[in-house]
Image (cartoon, rainbow, N blue to C red):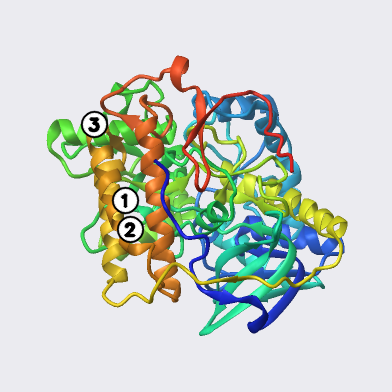
C-alpha cells in the first residue's frame, strides 16, 4: 500500500508570491550540484543554485576516503567495473557502470581544473592512491589525507563563484517541485527565511543528497533528510530501490559523542577489526576480512555482537606506522583525540550506522527522471551504478560524472523548451495549521522506529509493525501544515520511511545492504528486480536488465 500524501507541503498562490527566474535551477551545493551548475552555465544557461544551509554543508564535505578512478598501471576500467558490479550484488546496470567508471580519469582532471589538489608523492609527483574494501587495486585518490570531501567542497564552491551566470542562494529550503498542466517541470516553491517564493525554471536539477537521517544511528549531517527524493515523488517522479540503505561498518560508538565515520581508508592502510576480547573475526564471515565490501563487514559485526552480547567491537589502528597514520588519517586521529583515545595505542569502539542512500529518484545516466524537465544527480538518484550496495568511493565519482552530464542535459532541455513562462498555480496545502504536533518528537520517533525495525537486520514481523505505526503517524503528520523547514523535513522523513519500509517488506531475500533474517539467501528467481514506487500507485517490480535505463518523456 502506497503512502498517502498531499501534493504540496505548503499552501500557495503563485501570482501573489515574489518571483525568481532561471533557465536551470539546481537544488543542492555538493559535488553533483556544483558540477551541474558549472556545466549548465558553460552551456549558456542562467543558473540558480539553492542550498538549504551554507554552501559548504552537506555530505560531500564529510567524504573522507576519496574518489575511485583507474589511475595506476596494471589497473583497468574493466576491473573497476567488475568490483562495482560484484559489490552491487546482481542489480547494477552494466552500461551505466561502464560509462561512469570509464570516465574516472576525466573526473579527476575536472576536479583538478576546478582547483582540487590531490595528495601526491613528494619525490615523483605522482598521485598517492589508496585501496578500500571491495577494490582489487589501489585506485582511491585523496586530498589532505582523509579530508578529501572538505577539500573538494571548498575548491568547487570557489569554482562556482568564479563562473559567470551562476547565482547562489543559501538558507533556501526548497519545499516542492512545481509542475505545469502536462506534468512537466515548471519551477520550485522555496522558503527563504520567513518568505515563500516561486522560482520559475524550465529545468530543475535535484542534487540534494540522501536520506540517512531516517535512522537514529547515522553518519550523516542533520541536513540529510531526503527532501529531494520526497519532493520528486510528490511531483510524480518514480523512485526506485528505497529499501537499499548502506550501513557503514566502522562508525565511532562512544556514548554522548557524535556517530563519526571512521574512514574506509583505515582498513585499507592495515587497521583491523577485533571483538572486545581482542580477537579478529571478520575472516570467519568472508576471506577478504577487513577488505570485504561494507555490507559484508556490517553484517559480520552485527552478527558477532549478537552472538557474544556486545554492543560494539573495536577498530585497532596500531598496525599502521605512526607517521603513516598521522599523514594518511589525520581526521581519524583527531576523532580519537576528541573522545580521549590515542589511536596509536588504543582501539576505537565502533559499530555500524546508516551511511548512504543507495536507492532514490529513478534516472538515466544523464540524470533524466520520469518527469519532463526534472533531473537528479548524486545520492538523490538511482541510475543503476550501485545496484544493491555502493562500492566505497564511487559516490564522489558518480557526483562528478553524472552531475556534469545532468547540467549539460538540463541546459539543453531549457533551451529547447523556450522562454520561461510564469504560471497561475495554487494549492490549499495539506490542511489546517498544526496545533499540537511536536515536530522534534516526530523526527526522533521515526528515526528510532526505522533503526529498530528496518536497520541492519530486518524481518517480516518487525517491518509489518513498522509499516502500521508509520501509516498511523503519517495520517496525523501529513494532514496538517507545518510551514517551517523543520516541519517540512519531518513530513519528508515520514514519507520516505514508509517508502523504505514498504520496499523492505516486499523484498523477501537478502541482497547487498538489505539483510532479511527470515530470508537469509539471495533469490534471483523472485527478486532480481527493482521495486519502483510512484505517488498514488502500488509498488511495481521492474525486472532487472543489464542495459541502461532509457527515460522517455
Up the image or down, 406 lies above or below 47; here it is above
Give how far across and how far down residue 387 sits, in percent.
53, 32
Closest to the observer: 476 or 363?
476
Element type at mark 2: helix
Q: Residues within 10 Å of mark 3 (few under 14, many from 20)?
A: some
Residue 413 position in % (x across, y down): 81, 54
- Tag 3 residue: 303
Q: Nearer the viewer, mark 3 or mark 2?
A: 2
Give the quadrant of residue 47.
bottom right
Image quadrant in which you'd find residue 69: top right
**Which residue of the protein is positioned furthest toward the left in this rendering?**
309
Left-right relation of 226 to 298: right
Q: Secondary structure at mark 1?
A: helix
Using the image, tell me which numbered label, if any, was put on residue 475.
2
Residue identifier under label 1: 471
- Asked which quadrant contains residue 100, the reply is top right
Q: Residue at x 28, y 35 (%)?
A: 457
**Separation (CA) of disc 3 from disc 1:** 30 Å
Work out how far the residue at label 3 is from the one at label 2, CA to CA, in angstroms.
36 Å
User: In this rendering, does residue 222 appear at all?
Assistant: no
Amino acid at each position: 500500500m502506497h503512502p498517502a500524501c498531499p501534493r504540496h507541503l505548503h499552501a500557495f498562490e503563485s501570482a501573489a508570491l515574489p518571483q525568481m527566474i532561471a533557465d536551470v535551477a539546481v537544488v543542492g551545493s555538493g559535488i553533483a550540484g556544483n558540477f551541474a551548475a558549472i556545466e549548465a552555465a558553460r552551456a549558456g544557461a542562467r543558473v540558480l543554485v539553492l542550498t538549504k544551509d551554507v554552501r559548504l554543508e552537506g555530505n560531500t564535505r564529510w567524504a573522507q576516503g576519496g574518489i575511485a578512478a583507474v589511475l595506476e598501471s596494471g589497473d583497468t576500467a574493466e576491473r573497476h567495473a567488475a568490483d562495482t558490479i560484484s559489490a552491487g550484488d546482481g542489480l547494477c546496470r552494466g552500461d551505466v557502470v561502464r560509462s561512469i567508471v570509464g570516465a574516472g580519469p576525466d573526473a579527476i582532471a575536472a576536479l583538478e581544473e576546478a582547483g582540487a589538489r590531490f595528495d601526491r608523492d613528494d619525490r615523483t609527483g605522482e598521485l598517492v592512491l589508496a585501496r578500500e574494501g571491495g577494490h582489487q587495486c589501489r585506485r582511491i585518490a585523496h586530498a589532505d589525507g582523509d579530508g578529501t570531501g572538505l577539500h573538494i567542497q571548498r575548491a568547487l564552491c570557489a569554482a562556482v563563484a568564479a563562473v559567470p551566470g551562476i547565482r547562489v542562494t543559501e538558507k533556501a529550503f526548497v519545499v516542492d517541485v512545481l509542475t505545469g498542466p502536462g506534468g512537466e517541470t515548471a519551477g520550485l516553491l522555496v522558503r527563504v527565511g520567513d518568505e515563500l517564493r516561486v522560482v520559475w525554471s524550465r529545468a530543475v536539477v535535484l542534487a540534494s543528497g540522501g536520506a540517512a537521517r531516517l535512522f537514529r544511528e547515522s553518519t550523516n549531517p542533520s541536513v540529510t533528510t531526503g527532501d529531494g527524493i520526497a519532493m520528486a515523488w510528490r511531483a510524480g517522479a518514480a523512485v526506485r530501490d528505497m529499501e537499499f540503505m548502506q550501513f557503514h561498518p566502522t562508525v565511532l560508538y562512544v556514548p554522548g559523542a557524535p556517530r563519526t565515520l571512521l574512514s574506509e581508508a583505515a582498513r585499507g592502510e592495515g587497521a583491523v577489526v577485533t571483538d572486545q576480547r581482542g580477537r579478529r573475526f571478520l575472516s570467519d564471515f568472508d576471506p577478504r576480512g577487513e577488505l570485504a565490501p561494507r555490507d559484508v563487514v556490517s553484517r559480520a559485526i552485527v552478527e558477532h555482537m549478537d552472538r557474544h552480547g556486545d554492543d560494539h567491537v573495536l577498530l585497532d589502528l596500531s598496525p599502521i606506522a605512526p607517521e603513516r597514520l598521522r599523514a594518511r588519517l589525520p581526521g581519524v586521529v583527531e576523532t580519537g583525540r576528541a573522545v580521549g583515545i590515542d589511536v596509536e595505542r588504543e582501539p576505537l569502539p565502533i559499530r555500524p550506522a546508516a551511511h548512504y542512500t543507495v536507492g532514490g529518484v529513478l534516472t538515466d545516466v544523464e540524470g533524466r527522471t520520469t518527469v519532463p524537465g526534472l533531473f537528479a544527480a548524486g545520492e538523490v538518484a538511482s541510475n543503476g551504478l550501485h545496484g544493491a550496495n555502493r562500492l566505497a568511493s564511487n559516490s564522489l565519482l558518480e557526483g562528478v560524472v553524472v552531475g556534469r552530464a545532468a547540467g549539460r542535459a538540463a541546459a539543453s532541455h531549457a533551451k529547447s523548451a523556450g522562454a520561461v513562462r510564469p504560471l497561475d498555480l495554487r494549492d490549499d496545502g495539506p490542511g489546517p495549521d498544526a496545533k499540537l504536533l511536536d515536530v522534534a518528537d516526530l523526527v526522533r520517533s521515526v528515526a528510532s522506529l526505522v533503526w529498530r525495525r528496518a536497520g541492519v537486520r530486518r524481518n517480516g514481523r518487525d517491518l509489518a509493525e513498522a509499516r502500521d505505526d508509520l501509516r498511523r503517524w503519517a495520517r496525523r503528520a501529513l494532514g496538517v501544515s507545518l510551514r517551517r523547514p523543520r516541519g517540512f523535513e519531518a513530513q519528508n522523513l515520514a514519507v520516505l520511511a514508509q517508502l523504505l519500509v514498504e520496499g523492505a517488506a516486499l523484498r523477501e531475500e537478502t541482497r547487498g545492504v538489505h539483510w532479511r533474517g527470515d530470508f537469509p539467501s539471495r533469490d534471483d528467481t523472485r527478486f532480481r528486480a527493482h521495486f519502483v514506487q510512484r505517488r498514488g500507485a502500488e509498488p511495481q517490480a521492474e525486472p532487472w536488465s543489464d542495459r541502461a535505463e532509457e527515460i522517455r518523456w
